[in-house]
Every structure is written in structure tokens, then in C-alpha cells.
Amino acid sequence: MSEQQEKVGAGLLRRLGAIVYDTLLVIAVLMVITFLFVPFLQGRVLVPQEVGALAYLYWLVQIAAVVTFFGYFWTRRGQTAGMLAWRLRLEQTDGANVSWPVALKRMGILIALLIPFFAGDWLIWREWSAPQRRLMNGLALLPLAASYLWVWIDRDRRALHDRWSQTRVVLLPKARR
């Protein structure tokens, strides 16, 4: 058997473990970015109504930081810190490292799956009562949840966004001591 056929797709629980780990790291990075913007606020809140264009710059820097975080690690070793801890690796379906265009495509697909959540909360149901908003936000996360739950029925254990971006997340063998 070739090395490509021996690789096992990562399960959902390992993926979620890596996501939690990486989310904590990304939050830390975003906190540092926020700290860098504080001296320019002069006691105001970092929203467009208070600080104008500075808020948009802040959002742009945050997005760039998140894209750079995942893109850098995915294109170098195929692993973020969370993926390293959970012995996961992102690669193209042929086993090669993910390129920047593929990493950006993968991120774009994941963002597209989150559009109902953010757009609905921002455009449609922000005026609704709290129980209605919680219900609608939960329903709006169904596309993303469906993409990850697809791992359970896919023969190669690939999520829908893996299939659409021609990538796969594989489980690496335990290191020998």
C-alpha cells in the first residue's frame, strides 16, 4: 500500500479539539491587536460611530491576522498549534502541502458557510427578542455544522469544505519514543 492510501482521515472530535485550541490562540492574537489600538482611542469605543475609519482599519487588521495565522501554518507544515497537539495535518488530496491559493479557498468556503449567521444577526433578526435570536443564530450555523458532520458519513472522513477545497485533514501516527 502506498503512503497516500495508508493515511487516515481525521475524526470530528479531534478536529473540534484542534479548533478549540486554535480558537484560544487566535483570541490571544486578536487581544494583542486590540491592545495596540487602545492608545489611539482616547477613551472611546472601537466602533465606527465613535472612531470612524479607525474601526474599519481595526477590523481589517483582525481579518488579516486570522488569515495570516491559518494561511502561514497551513502552507508551511500543514499544522496549526491545535492541529499539532491533536496530531492532525491539513494537506491537498495528493498529500502535498497546501498552497496559499488553496488555503484562501478553504478559508473562503468556511466564511461562506458562516454568512447566514453573521448576515442574519446583522441584517434581519437583531431587533427580535432574545429567544428568537438564539434560535435563528443556531439555525444559521447549520451550514457550517453540516459541513463538519459530513465527516461521519464520508468514506474518506472529509468535511464538505475539505471536498470543495480539494484538501483533507489526516491523522498522523504517534511519534515513536
Image (cartoon, grey):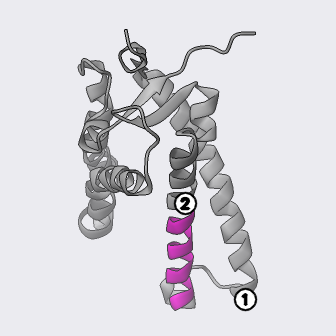
Closer to the N terminus: mark 2 or mark 1?
1
Amino acid marked by disc 1: Gln
Farthest front residue in view: 2
Question: Label 1: which residue?
Answer: 42
Residue drawn at 25 percent across, 35 percent down: 146
Amino acid marked by disc 2: Thr
Residue in front for this viewpoint, 138 or 102: 102
- Residue 164 image position (x, y, % from top left): 24, 43
- Residue 8 image position (x, y, % from top left): 41, 17
Task: Say whether residue 73 is left or right of residue 146.
Answer: right
Dot 2: few (<14), some (14–19), or many (≥20) neighbours within 10 Å?
Answer: some
Residue drawn at 28 percent across, 50 percent down: 113
102 in the magenta segment: no
- Residue 31 image position (x, y, % from top left): 68, 62
In magenta, the rendered stretch is: 53-65
Question: Label 2: which residue?
Answer: 68
